[in-house]
Image (cartoon, rainbow, N blue to C red):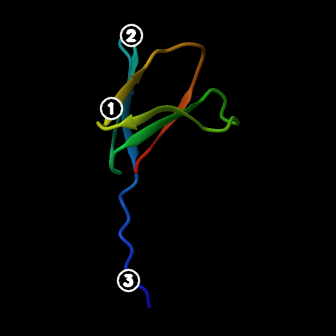
Amino acid sequence: FSPPVSLNPGVVITSVSSSGGPLTINWCGGAPPYTLQRKTLITDAWSDFQTGITGTSTTDVISGGSAFYRVVGN
């Protein structure tokens, strides 16, 4: 037998909003530092957009038609 493994809870995006300005993304779970990843097409590979995020929210300037986001915790 091996000792139990402690896992951090997964990161869950709780809200995405925009009020005529930047897009605000909020999440919970995981542990900092966080990395926001983004892709333009669903078939694209994920790429790091913002790294070293210590809080549980960030913003992005809306440009183009659509984007897909995910947050990765430590």
70 on left or right of 73: right
Q: What amino acid is at disc 1? A: Ser
In the picture as drawn, the residue positioned furthest to the bottom comes out as 1
At x 31%, y 37%, the residue is: 56
Q: Secondary structure at mark 3?
A: loop
Q: Residue 45: which quarter of the image?
A: top right
Q: What x and y, as percent, mark residue 11?
A: 39, 48
Compared with 9, 5 (above or below) is below
Of residues 54 and 20, which is closer to you in this image?
Answer: 54
**Dot 3 corresponds to which residue?**
3
Q: Residues within 10 Å of mark 2 (few under 14, many from 20)?
A: few
Q: What x and y, as percent, mark residue 13?
A: 39, 39
Q: What x and y, as percent, mark residue 73?
A: 41, 48
Compared with 42, 62 (above or below) is above
**Dot 1 corresponds to which residue?**
57
54 on left or right of 67: left
Q: From the viewer's perspective, is the residue at label 1 or at label 2 nearer?
A: 1
The answer to whether marks 1 and 2 mark residues whose Cβ atoms lie closer than 8 Å is no
Alpha carbon distance from label 1 to label 2: 15 Å
Q: Secondary structure at mark 2?
A: loop
**Dot 2 corresponds to which residue?**
21
Alpha carbon distance from label 2 to label 3: 49 Å
Compared with 60, 3 (above or below) is below
